[in-house]
């Protein structure tokens, strides 16, 4: 049994999980939007209602406002067809555990109802990596944003719709993403884009080299 991490306030953590038996957890764009909506909704320590009964007007207002008493702060995220990544800062006691449980429970109920299925959608308890220093935080954010590129879901990191990378390029803090701390570590959005793209080019060059070796055999 994996060691359970005690989450400390004001500390950073990489949180991730995937679908049961590696199955897809998103089947169309509305599913991706629903989980992002759940993440935004359940940032609040004491939401006034449940996401399942909130109307469109309430959700639009919510997306434009900061939570009054947030459980966590989201620094980066990426949703992939069969898993997700979050880079979180815990703000309240047990904030990460509460936030993930509420978000995942809400999304699972939505998904099971929509696709007429029963049972868990995700593979057990979410996985956690505690961030030890700023350098690790910076590299984790790049790893998260490069996931769609390394998995060949996109040819350009900036074109992938279901990650927080665009907020980094625009240096834009919104309810769902706070890139400022990481951008301050590297001084600017431009430097961050170069930091990500240089590694993407490196990955691509290694792959092309390996392909040449295969072709020469």
Image (cartoon, rainbow, N blue to C red):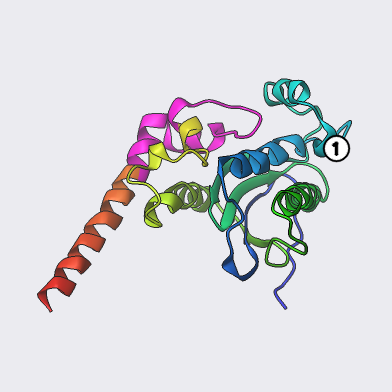
In the picture, which quadrant includes the N terminus?
bottom right
Q: Residue 127, relative to residue 30: is it above or below?
A: below
Give the magenta part as a residue range. 169-196
Q: As rendered, which of 67 and 117 lies closer to the eye?
A: 117
Q: Main secondary structure of the magenta part?
A: helix
Element marked by disc 1: loop
Give the class, few, some or many, for how many residues have Cα within 10 Å of label 1's Cα (few <14, many ≥20): few
Q: As rendered, which of 151 and 175 lies closer to the eye?
A: 151
Tell me the quarter of the picture where residue 7 sits.
bottom right
Q: Look at mark 1 in the image and give the residue it sits on.
A: 50
Q: Residue 58, relative to residue 25: is it above or below?
A: above
Q: Left of 97 or right of it: where is 214?
A: left
Q: Residue 5, relative to residue 103: is it above or below?
A: below
Q: Position of residue 183 (x, y in %)?
A: 48, 34
Q: Left of 6 or right of it: where is 159?
A: left
Residue under the image location 81 percent in, 49 percent down: 98
- Residue 8 in view (yes/no): no
Q: Position of residue 178 (x, y in %)?
A: 59, 33
Magenta stretch contains residue 75: no
Residue under the image location 77 percent in, 60 percent down: 6
In the picture, which quadrant includes the C terminus?
bottom left
Q: Position of residue 192 (x, y in %)?
A: 40, 37
Magenta stretch contains residue 190: yes
Q: As rendered, which of 124 and 52 lies closer to the eye?
A: 52
Please identify the residue farthest to the front as the structure is shown: 116
Tell me the quarter of the picture where residue 173 sits.
top right
- Residue 115 in view (yes/no): yes
Residue under the image location 76 percent in, 29 percent down: 67
Residue under the image location 34 percent in, 42 percent down: 156
Please identify the residue farthest to the left as the structure is shown: 216
Q: Position of residue 203 (x, y in %)?
A: 30, 57
Tell me the quarter of the picture where residue 181 sits.
top right
């Amino acid at each position: 049994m994996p060691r359970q991490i005690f989450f400390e306030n004001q500390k950073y953590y990489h949180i991730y999980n995937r679908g049961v038996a590696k199955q897809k957890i998103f089947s169309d764009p509305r599913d991706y939007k629903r989980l992002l909506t759940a993440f935004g909704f359940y940032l609040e320590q004491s939401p006034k209602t449940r996401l399942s009964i909130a109307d469109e007007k309430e959700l639009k207002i919510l997306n434009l406002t900061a939570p009054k008493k947030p459980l966590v702060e989201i620094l980066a995220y990426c949703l992939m067809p069969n898993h997700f990544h979050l880079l979180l800062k815990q703000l309240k006691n047990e904030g990460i555990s509460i936030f993930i449980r509420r978000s995942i429970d809400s999304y699972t109920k939505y998904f099971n109802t929509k696709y007429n299925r029963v049972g868990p959608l995700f593979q057990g308890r979410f996985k956690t990596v505690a961030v030890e220093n700023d350098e690790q935080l910076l590299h984790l954010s790049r790893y998260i944003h490069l996931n769609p590129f390394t998995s060949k879901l996109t040819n350009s990191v900036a074109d992938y719709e279901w990650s927080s990378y665009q907020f980094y390029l625009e240096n834009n803090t919104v309810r769902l993403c706070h890139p400022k701390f990481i951008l301050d570590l590297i001084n600017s959005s431009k430097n961050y884009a170069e930091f990500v793209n240089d590694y993407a080019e490196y990955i691509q060059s290694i792959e092309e080299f390996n392909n040449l070796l295969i072709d020469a055999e």
